Amino acid sequence: ELKRFTGHTGEVLTVTFAPGGLQAASGGADKTVRLWDLANGKELHTCAGHFGPVFGVAFGHDGKHVFSCGEDKTVRMWDVATGKEVKQFTGHAEFINGLAVSPNGTLLAGAGQDRSVYLWDIASGKKAQQLIGHGSGVYRVTFSPDGLKLASASADQTARLWGVKTGKAVQEFRGH
């Protein structure tokens, strides 16, 4: 163990590094996102506003914002420097389990328990697309390095590959 980061008052459910690796964000059952300085182990900010557990966190491509999602069906955008909420993204009918930010920092993907993936335009906050095709809740999403494809993983025992521009499923992976 190199360092121990304490502050959450419930289970820690998710964690991620900031670009550059100098900070991290964690989310938990205590309905908060906590921002950490990795050099000294100190908490920088507590971001409070979710009405339920936080299931996913993801930094923006430049590290200036962190996004969080959870049981309250919202994605929230936080300013890393101040810990203040900047914007909310909505649309999912059930929990949002996981997040990903496109490599160019323009799109945000949310994996929903409602069996869909939402893509939002980060600048406007508006829904760009809803990807539908999974038979159960979607747990994780990730963009390809070029940002042209999105992969999603679901409780329906499949992973799917989507075209980001078209919103269409390109491939389905079975076997789990």
Image (tube, grey):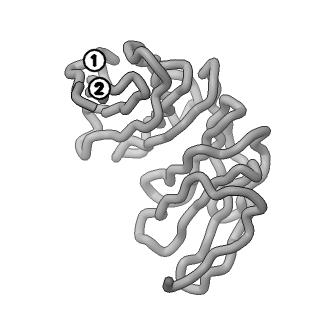
Q: Residue at x 38, y 41 (%)?
A: 102
Where residue 104 sits: x, y (%)?
36, 45
- Determine whether 36 is above or below 120 in the image: below
Where residue 159 sits: x, y (%)?
30, 29
Would residue 48 appear left or right of 163 to someone viewing this image?
right
For label 2, the SS is strand
Q: Residue at x 29, y 26 (%)?
A: 160
Q: Which of 46 and 152 lies nearest the eye of the viewer?
A: 152
Q: Mark 2 touching mark 1, by CB under 8 A?
A: yes
Q: Quadrant of residue 148?
A: top left
- Determine whether 36 is above or below 33 in the image: below
Would residue 120 appear left or right of 156 to someone viewing this image?
right
> Residue 144, can we see it?
yes
Q: Of the residues shown, which amino acid type is indicated by label 1?
A: Ala
Q: Which residue is mark 1?
A: 169
Where residue 157 sits: x, y (%)?
34, 26
Q: Which of 90 and 124 lies nearest the eye of the viewer?
A: 90
- Label 2: few (<14), some (14–19) or many (≥20) C-alpha neighbours in 10 Å: some
Residues at marks 2 and 1, CA–CA distance in whole angstroms: 7 Å
Upstream in sequence: badge 2 or badge 1: 2
Number of labelled discs? 2
Task: Name the mark on residue 160.
Answer: 2
Where residue 170 sits: x, y (%)?
21, 20
